[in-house]
Every structure is written in C-alpha cells, then in structure tokens.
Image (tube, grey):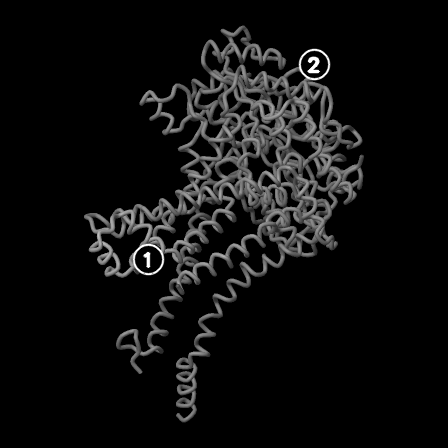
Amino acid sequence: MVDRYGSSTRREFIKRFGATGAVAALGPSLLLAACAEEEATTTTAAATTTTGPAAAPSTSFVEPRTSLSGELKILLWSHFVPAHDVWFDVFAKEWGDQVGVAVTVDHIGVGDVPAAIAGELQSGSPEHDLLQYIAVQGQHEPSVVDMKDVVDEAISRYGTMLELTRKSSFNPNTGKFYAYAPAWVPDPGDYRKSLWTPAGFPNGPSTWDELLDGGAKIFSEQGVQMGIGMSQEIDSNMAGRSLLWSFGGSIQDENEKVVLNSDATIAAVEYMKELYENAMTPEVFAWNAASNNQGLIAGELSYILNSISAWRTSQETDTAIANDTFFTPALAGPATAIAAQHVLYNWLVPDFSSVNVDAAQEFLLHYTENLASVAWHSKLYDFPAFASRVPELNSWLDNDPFGAQPADKLSVLKTATDWATNIGHPGPANPAIGQVFGESILPVMYADVAQGNKPPAQAVEDATAQIEAIFGDWRGRGLVGG
Amino acid sequence: MATEVITTRRRRYLLDNERVLGSVLMTPAVIYIVALVGFPFVLAIIYALSDVTTGSRGFNFVGFDNFVRILDDPVFLRSLRNTFVFAAISNILVVVLAKALAMILVADFKGKWVIRFFVLLPWTTPISLATIMWLWTLDSLFSPIDWVLRWLGLIESNSYFLGKPGLAMASVIIVHTWRIVPLAAVIMMAGLAAIPHEINDAAQVDGAGFWRKLFEITIPLMAPIIAVAVLFGVILTITDMSVVWVLTRGGPTNSTQVLATWSFLKGIEGGALSQGAAIALFLLPVLVGLTVVILRLARRVEVF
C-alpha cells in the first residue's frame, strides 16, 4: 500500500518517524543527564577547591541522639552569598557520611521557594525532608512537625534562643514550634558617607527626622535621591514596619489584635509622604528586592534600608562605593528605635510518613552546633539565634575578615539584637502577619498616600480593613489569637 | 512459521486500522491534557469550594464562600478591572498591528524571510526571559529609552516607566502586545494567503482603492481568522501572569495587579489556597462564554 507519504507505506512511515520520535523524546533527557553530571562534577570541584580565608572556623561534630539511616533531602534558597552554598553542600554531605545518611541538597531561587514548599506540602508526599525559607512560614503549621524537641535540645546545649527568632517560629495559640529558626539577618541602614558628610551628618542619620533633613539636603544640593521602597517586595515591607514601630504604631498588639488604625500609623504615613516628596523619586514604587542594592552599588542612592549584601557586592564591583558605604542602626522615631529582621530562616520538617524526621532534626542540631561556620561562610550576613555558638562574632565585626575598609565598619551590628525584632512585633509572627507581609499591604498603604491617591486616614482605614479580614480567616482556623 | 505470519498479519491489521491507529496516536495527547490541564483544573475547582490552605491537612466544603469573600476585597475588584483593561486594549492593538504586519509580510520584497524571522522572535523567546529584557529596558535608573530621550533633549529627568501607575499600565500593555502580535500576524498571514487573487483583481478592475478593498473585501473575508487571533490573544492575556509578575508584581499600588498575579499572591505567598483558587477561576465562565461566542461568530461568518 503506497500512501500520501510518498513511496513508503504507513507502517514504514510509523517505523521511521517512531524511531525519530524516540530519539527526540529521549534527547532532552540524555542532554539533561549529561548536564546534571557536568554540574555535579563542577560542584564537587568547586567545593573541594574553595577554602576561604585561613581563619575560617572548623566544623565540629556531635553524635546524633539516635542512630540514623536512609536519605535526607534538603530544599533551600540560593543564598545571596554564593560561597555559602558551596560550603553548605559539602557541610551537609560530610555530616551525612558520618552518620550514615545519604544527603541531597537542592538550591532554588528565593522567589520560587514559597510555591515549592506549598506544592510539596499539598502533594501529601513531599520530595524533601527539610524545607527552608527566608521568611516566616506559620501558614504551614498543620502540615509540619512540631520542632519543640529540637528547640529544647538546642537551648539545653547552647543557652537562650534569641527572642525574635523564637517569636518567628512559635505559635503561642497552639503551643507549637512550626519551624526551627537558628539564624537571622539584621537590617541596618546603608549610607554613603561622602554624601551625608556635607549635609551635616558624617555618621549618617540616627533618627527619622535626620533622615528627612539630610536626605532632602542631599537630594536638592547633590542631586542624589535616597531609597526607602514603597513597592510590593521584601525590603519595602521591612522598611514600612520599622517606620511604623518607630512612630508607635503596629499591625497587631501583643495579643494579636489588629491595632493598625491609630494616630501613630497616620503620623508614620504622613512622614513617609514628606520623605518621598523631598528626598525620593517614583522609582521606589517600582522596585523589586534587588533594586535598592543595584541603586546603591551604582552610586545612585544616598541611603537604603537593607542587609550588608549590597555593600558586599560592591566590594567586588566598585571598591570606591564599598569604602564609602557605612551602616546605621535602626532609626529613632517619636516612640522608639527598632527595625525588622531582614531575613529570618524558617526550617520546616513536613509531617508525613515518608519524611526522615530524625535525620532532619539531627541535621538541624548539627547546623546549630556550627553556626560560626554559617556566619563565616555567609561573610557575616547570617547571624546566630544562639549567641554562644559564635563567640568570635563581635571580633569579626570589629575587624572584618572579608576586607571592609575601614575594618571596623560592621561594628554597628554588634548591637543588632537590641534594635531588631520580628515582623509581628509586639506580637508573634503568626500566619496572618505572614499573609499581610506577602500581600504587601503596608507598602501599598504608604504608596497610596505618597502618590496622592488617598488621604492618610483613608489609606490606613483601608489597609486595616484588609488586615482585619485576613486575621479573621486565620482566627477561624485557630492559628491566630486576639 | 505459521504463528509468525499470524502475528505479522495482526500487526499489519492494527497499523492499517484507522480506528485503532487513531486512538493509539491520540492517547499521548489525551494523557497529557488530562494530567497537566484536566487534573489541575478539577483540583482548582475543589480548592475553590473548600477552606484549604497551603499548610492544611483537612478539607471542609464551604460552597461559594470564597467567591463571596473575594468580592469584598477591593484589590480583587481592582485586579478584575485591570484584567479587562489589559485584555481589551492589548487585543485592539494586537489586531490592528498584526493585520498591518501580515499585509507587509505577504508582500514580495527582498529579505522577506529575514524580516519574518525577526518578527517571530518575540513569540519564540521564553516569556519570562523576554520580560526580564523589558524590565531592564524600562528600569527606573538605567533605562536606555530614558537615555535616548534625554540625549534628544525630550526629557530632563527619568520617566520611571514602572513607578508611575499610568506608565506602568501602559508598559504592561505594550509588552503583552509586543509578545502576542507575532502569533496573531502569522495567523492573519494564513488568512490573507487564502483570499483568492481573483477577488482583489476584480475589485481593482472596478476601481476600488486600498481602503475600500481593505474594509469591503479583506477584513470581511478574514473575519473568522481574525476572530481566532482575538481568541488566542484574549486568553493569553487574561491567563498570563509572567509579564505583570516580572515587571511590576502588581504595583505600583496594585495599579497593574491582575487576577493571575493576585491569585498567586493570595494563594501561594499568603497561604490562602482556596481563595487563590477562587480568584483564578473567577473568570472561567467569562472565558468559556467568550470562546463559544467567538467560535460561533467565526463559523457563522465562514458559512456566509
């Protein structure tokens, strides 16, 4: 039978194209396998050749409380400091080799982690035994293991746990530690000394009033704006909370009752409008999480609220900018001087039968044991929740091992635990607070007023209504008090 | 030997039987659609009618509560409005530009194939990658567009394309249009090529000019194919979250928030999975209705 495919039969056509199809189908798999192999080789090579400065802390090992076996699959973000990931992968695998557990580590982009965690927990059969994210994950409480055992053990070994990390991993309404939070990252102000000195503030601003005064002068006289974000991203959320607390406002009180609609909040919103009109440009409404870093590194911003990551990057890209960048603690407002943490590590263990809970929890204790290595390999980005594990931290901050000029530039961070707090301050970082954060309600509230879309009282009232609805939902599930 | 012959005959029979062969060849596509479209779709409906969260273990049926709740949310209402605005303006631009582009590309000129290749590039580039290119192009501080405008003396300070609500909306619409025009142009090129030359020749002999031929011959004859292009455009615009997510994440002040991004923010980032599902499904009846209407219209015009 000769058909329309020319002189061949349909059977021949199927045979011929079937073979081609098989190759086409298998091709990408083969290619991926080859790439994976290449990647694995590269990772191993990088890990074995990366040594870091000579004074890097050595890894210490403590026997697990129970005998372990099987696999431990870990999912975590790709750290802002790539050297951390190279160290972590080797660190985790070496631990696995010692205790008889096959460890696999998967890093993914920070923006992809929330969807990955949600997907794994919803699947009912998580791919990973240990999930980590850089923000509070209280919404997953019903599907994760209570980490009280790990917290108690860590406290018994290493002493008090930092309050802000405790409040960012513990639900007082259910008495459950939905996560383990052994490390965090401070959120200081980053300012350019050469710009702030002529404005009369050689040591940078120390209050929100000075920020307005100096920032406006720099903008009008030197043409450089500042960058306090009012966009739907993490840094804007953190900045908005610092300002709110410093003016005496907050989203919730200690008992998780919504108290946003207050004179203090309205005053904070009015202040932000004034700051925008005198010292900033519309770029702050369009930012993503990397934008203020890029602006500072490019020398286009006089002041930002961020971790030390932007400055660390500038050490490699532009030493003049790096040497000119200095840090301030939380700015003082009419009420107080506190700032939110920049990053807060929540480690979750899914509560499913397939999960190797013992291995996950013992690994976390091993990780806690080595928080000095964590701080070191993150180039002092990560701070410990158990101060006793990193006794060298203050000396490193006084004499930066990674080339700060001057070397004591980071000394201001020695007091970070005094002025940093959790995002639910003065209450816990509950799931409702997490959702308010995720939906960026505070940055939008500030931006609506700064852009003239709404009067301050209206913006605060609208934000409060949205927040009340969210709190109501989570109260109904028994996860939020008030 | 006899068994071998029977087996060969049976194989031949199966391969030559259109019913069997058709089913076999269709099976992978059906499995693909059921697994990657059908199953998530049914799951989304179930979620939307429940109180499930990203971390919840239980499942409680709550009827249409989620739909009622989201209607009280001002950001949802704004997202709904924005979705319609984006879809409408983008697709008007798409139809006009794609039609013009198709007419250019069916004409004979030197280098036509190179031009066709470049015109198709936006469609072949992965959307997230292409949008990141636009993100850099529209950057508040380093936009090359601003640089050129400043160099020409047309502006003094930056435009802040993504920082001002009006400009941000325009940016999102332009990127959507830029992305969909090539696909629509290719569809319309097929329509143009299908119009018999004799009709245009006869009209020309009768003295019809370009515009008269365009509005009285080309567009009426192409109506079904234009309808298909519009259908694709509307669905791709309404269901896409990449462009808004990469460019603005819905900002500034939710002025570019659309249902797809708000659904993701609510359901995944916020943990309220059931509400996120309800938001995602909200336009389903509208989209289904729109699809039916457009396809029926297209068929009716075709029959005439």
**Residue at 29% over, 49% down:** B212
Residue A150 appears in which quarter of the rendering? top right
**Residue at 38% over, 70% down:** A18
Q: Label 1 sits on what residue type?
A: Ala
**Residue at 31% over, 47% down:** B101
Which chain hosts label 1? B
Is residue A222 something one can see in this rendering? yes
Residue A338 appears in which quarter of the rendering? top right
- Label 2 or label 1, whichever lies nearer to me, is 1
Q: Residues within 10 Å of mark 2 (few under 14, many from 20)?
A: some
Which chain hosts label 2? A
* Secondary element type, mark 1: helix
Q: In this view, does A300 lie above or below A59?
A: above
Is residue B58 something one can see in this rendering? no
The spot of residue B10 in percent (x, y) is 43, 86
Q: In this view, does B85 lie above or below B8?
A: above
* Circles 2 and 1 in contact, beta carbons < 8 Å: no
The spot of residue A169 in percent (x, y) is 71, 37
Label of residue B190 in the image: 1
Q: Mark 2 points at which residue?
A: A334
Q: Label 2 sits on what residue type?
A: Pro
The spot of residue A458 in percent (x, y) is 67, 26
* Secondary element type, mark 2: loop
In the shown orientation, is residue B139 left or right of residue A146? left
